[in-house]
Amino acid sequence: MSARIDAVFAKDRPAFVAYIMGGDPDAETSQRVMNALPDAGVDIIELGFPFTDPMADGPVIEEAGIRARKAGATLTSVLEMAKTFRAQDTDTPIILMGYANPVYQMGYEAFSDAASLAGVDGAIIVDLPPEEDGPLRQAMDARDMSLIRLATPTTDAARLPLVVSGSSGFVYYVSMTGVTGGALESGGSVAEQVARVRDAANLPVIVGFGVKTPDRAAEIGRDADGVVVGSAIVRALHEDGETKALELVRSLADATHAAR
């Protein structure tokens, strides 16, 4: 799939993945932050698009989506953000993250065409199970984009092969039960789960949901192929502004890269 994603995981270090909500708090600010993420150490950008019923999102991301929608953000405008970013950065992968309804409404073929033209490398569609993602996956495969699946602590041994069978690029391991921004349990279970998913998928495994601090990012980075942080960055942008948010991103990226 996307050569840009493959290039990230070919580096001899864990990748740092930053999530931002497209259009939060407004289009101009969100674009500036996105454009600055690679210089702050980000290897892969997860670009959220807002949805009215974000079942997997905690209050921080949900409120970011509300702010973005009030500012006029849509799936189409978020794709325009990606296109603008790609005009200045041809290397950093962009992964869209959101829910199936806006993609379905646009049409799988039209979405895949628009995302490909915008320079998007893949997508995580949180509420689209593997039993139902075939048409979207085929449309994205045809445009060399990755449809990335989620594995969780409740993905048992019987279901894991199905979950990872159609994934490409990497597998996103949700290392907690609950919504984004919750408390991640510490201990050795994440390492064991990452190894289990990596063996089943033969793909890199990145870990997200609940990682908030550089220390925790480093701890996860010792075992995973990458670390995702979303809520802490979104909260910092909302409460402390762009400069502080990017300082947090830099500290998280440095800690992840130095993990091993």
Image (cartoon, helix red, strand yellow):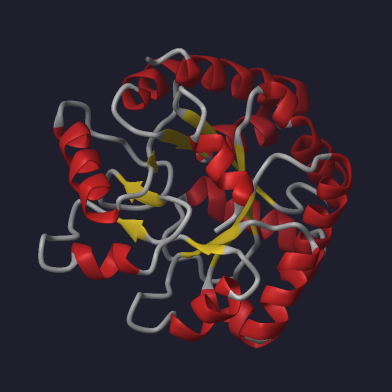
254 vs 22: above or below: above
State the residue at coordinates (21%, 39%).
195
- Observer able to see residue 238: yes
154 vs 259, left or right, is left
237 vs 52: above or below: above
In the picture, residue 48 is in which quadrant?
bottom right
Q: Position of residue 201 (x, y in %)?
A: 29, 55
Q: Position of residue 235 (x, y in %)?
A: 59, 35
Q: Position of residue 145 (x, y in %)?
A: 60, 64
38 vs 231, left or right, is right
State the residue at coordinates (65%, 61%).
49
Number of numbered discs overlaid on the protein picture: 0
29 vs 186: above or below: below
In which quadrant of the rendered image does the N terminus lie? bottom right
State the residue at coordinates (84%, 37%).
32
192 vs 58, left or right, is left
State the residue at coordinates (71%, 32%).
37
In which quadrant of the rendered image does the C terminus lie? top left
Q: Position of residue 172 (x, y in %)?
A: 39, 50
Q: Nearer the viewer, residue 68 or 138?
A: 138
- Observer able to see residue 74: no
